[in-house]
Amino acid sequence: METTVPELPEPSSAAENATASSAPRSLAEALRARDDASLAALLHARPDLLGPVPGDMTQLATRAGTRASVIRALDRLDRFALQTAEALAVAPDPCPYPVLESLLAGEHGSGSGAREDNGSRAELPRALATLRDQALVWGDDERLRLVRTARELLAPSAGRPSPTGLGPTVAEATAGMSPTRVQEIVAAAGLPATHDPVSAVTALTGLFNDPERMSALLDEAPAEAHQVLGRLVWGPPYGEVTPNPTPPVRWLRDRGLLLPASARTVVLPREVALHLRGGLAHRATEPLAPAVPADREHRPQLVDANAAGQALAALATVEELVKSWEHTGPPVLRAGGLSVRDLKRAAATLDATEPAAAFWIELAYAAGLLASDGEADERYAPTPAFDDWIELPPGERWSVLAEAWLPATRTAGLIGDQDAKGRTLSTLGPELDRSAAPEVRRRVLELLAALPEGGSANADTLLARLDWERPVRGTSALRARLARWTLTEAEVLGVTGRGALAAHGRALLEHRDPAPLLAPLFPEPVDHVLLQADLTAVAPGPLRRGLGDVLAVLADVESKGGATVYRFTPGSVRRALDSGRTASDLHAFLSEHSITPVPQPLAYLIDDVARRHGHLRVGVASSYVRCDDDGMLNEILADRRSTGLGLRRLAPTVLAAQAEPSALLDGLRAMGYAPAAESLTGDVVVTRADAHRTPARSAPVPVPDGPPVPDVTLLGAAVRAIRAGDLAATAVRKEPATAPVVAGELPRTSSAETLATVQAAALTGTAVWIGYVNADGAASQRVIAPVRVEGGFVTGYDHTADEVRTYALHRITGVAELAEEHL
């Protein structure tokens, strides 16, 4: 009988054996081999791994492979790093570096699998290093492994196509297929029959992976079959077929080049698609970030001046908005936020569009200048912080707004959209926070800052760059919207001018105070106006605080811009008189602050309104009207417009009314009279602008994008704790005589054995391994060097915590001595 000697693999060299034996066999081992700086970088990039601090490397590796954590890490990859991960998801597991390189960059040379070099080969080490740093890939270059959860997320399936456009492997597509059908496919493909379906699938896979044999098989295919394959090769790999398919489809299906995915669907196997693609995982790779060149260049001085003008207008807009809510602010909706009607009113007040008004409202809210008053009839009103803000120099006031805008997560651009339940998102309402907003704002400004001074970028190139940096679908769409809103908001706020980043915007980005850069660009406040004969006044620049406040009461703003135009009307003059000023006060004020003489029409208007002001007096009865001129009272009673006031004569000079005093005042003023309110003592009530303020309110806190990024101190402590816990978990123990210590389990010894072992360790100064259960019932394992054992406690240096600690002996589950080489 002849004996067949099986063919043995060639012996590998000693160096190869050493490399294989030293290669990490798990993600935990790969993490254990990292230095402290690399571990700290991982925890900094993925702060969700720190909640709470893992007890050892095994816990860290387990947490790094959870679905939520992996999804978050994938979301933060750039396009080429993500394409590298996608290629590993469809590559053999483990995957050698040359195989990964050919999937992304094609084969070397000029053959069918070669691809024009676009930098993929040069950038692949960087992308792979990114995946390793993020603990998404582990292993050396000979055995690259994508973490299992990432492979499940990125690998193709029937319900979730791969971004590569590839389908399942032959083995996956034939799972569940009858052995007879598999043998038929093998025979049709020209392969010898096998004894079992596993070897048959292996043979078919080998055929599809052999370029020469595969090319020979495809040369026999009908021309129409090549057209069918061409429609499926770059994905999606699934196609529908009829119960009686056409001859080209039948030819492909019989030879396994198309495999059934369902009763009416076929799929192109991954091996076939890769052959047709020349071994490429993607139709096109993008190894390099799209450049963001300067679209236009302006003089930096012009950019700064333009941005400063926008900043000054922003200050005036916010001030006008908040002051308009001083006396009767809009009510808070039951579900929170501002009604559409009140938003329209605010837009009319600011002479702006509704989206622009929503942005200014949200900005004032983010800066802590507006809030709800918290009363039963809850309304929005200025906060006490507004009074402090209004007294600051203009540059510092702008800094407050800009420093609130940059890190804010509330996103005004979402107002008017629908939430998940179909409800419209309202201004100042809930559901407006987007944690990605601060990062996108800062990134857009960083890209603008990278341009030459005075350079502006095209919006499309900016969006293309942001899409490359965060390409995950859903994430990239939101970032694109946030980027467009950032460009608009930065311009109207004055961070940019003509699309270019201003000097004070650059200071804001670099955490420097922008106020000193803005101060020289702002015009000095003026202390005069130009009175004109058409009952208007022109302010040639920003007015000083006192002058502006008085003029805002005495006149109405007609137009804004470089010069503000105010118009005097009977109503505005009466408003000034109601605030306690007399006609002589108004004449003196205008004479003092106008560089032109007071026009006669304006003087006559003031005198005429003052002559009639207070001639009628309204008090509390329900209310009453008192006037020394009984003829005027007769005129009021005879006027049909007074019917709704419920007036009746009490005396020749007194009328009683059913209306409240405020309603009576409004009604008489609507009839053209100028009544004054009267107190219980008969004195004229002076209506001063005592603004309503909320209680002290803090600005809304931005919603973080996941766990906060740890600082250097926390990272150092976390790395030390993980190292110490790993030391305790992996320390080699001396085998006890009774029962061996099982790795990963706490030691179990009797109380007498525990006491004797720790006493001996204290005498000899050696370290031992203990299991300990604290008062909360949490079990842990530690390596300690006992120093003192007394009173039921053992005190010693804890290598795990890197400090001296005391442990209760009755809480120690057991103790084991360390092996000699680990003492």
Image (spheres, grey):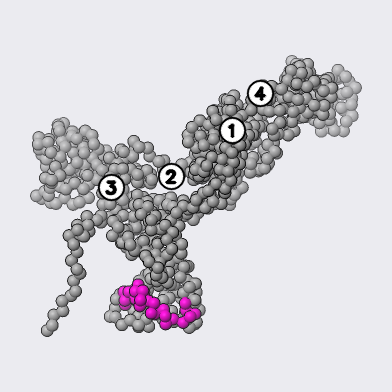
Q: State the residue at coordinates (44%, 52%).
A: 78
Q: Amino acid at mark 2?
A: Gly
In this orientation, does residue 3 appear?
yes
Q: Residues within 10 Å of mark 4 (few under 14, many from 20)?
A: few
Q: Quadrant of the N terminus?
A: bottom left
Residue type at the position of mark 1? Leu
The residue tagged 4 is 544
Residue stretch rendered in magenta on the structure: 200-226
Q: Is residue 797 above or below residue 117?
A: above
Say what secondary structure mark 4 lies in: loop
CA gap between label 1 and label 2 equals: 27 Å
Visible residue check, residue 618: no
In the image, residue 587 above or below residue 314: above
Spatial CA distance of label 3 from label 4 is 63 Å
SS for callout 3: loop
Residue at image mark 2? 706
Q: Identify the residue at horizontal 12%, vertical 36% (top origin).
A: 765
Q: Position of residue 473 (x, y in %)?
A: 49, 56
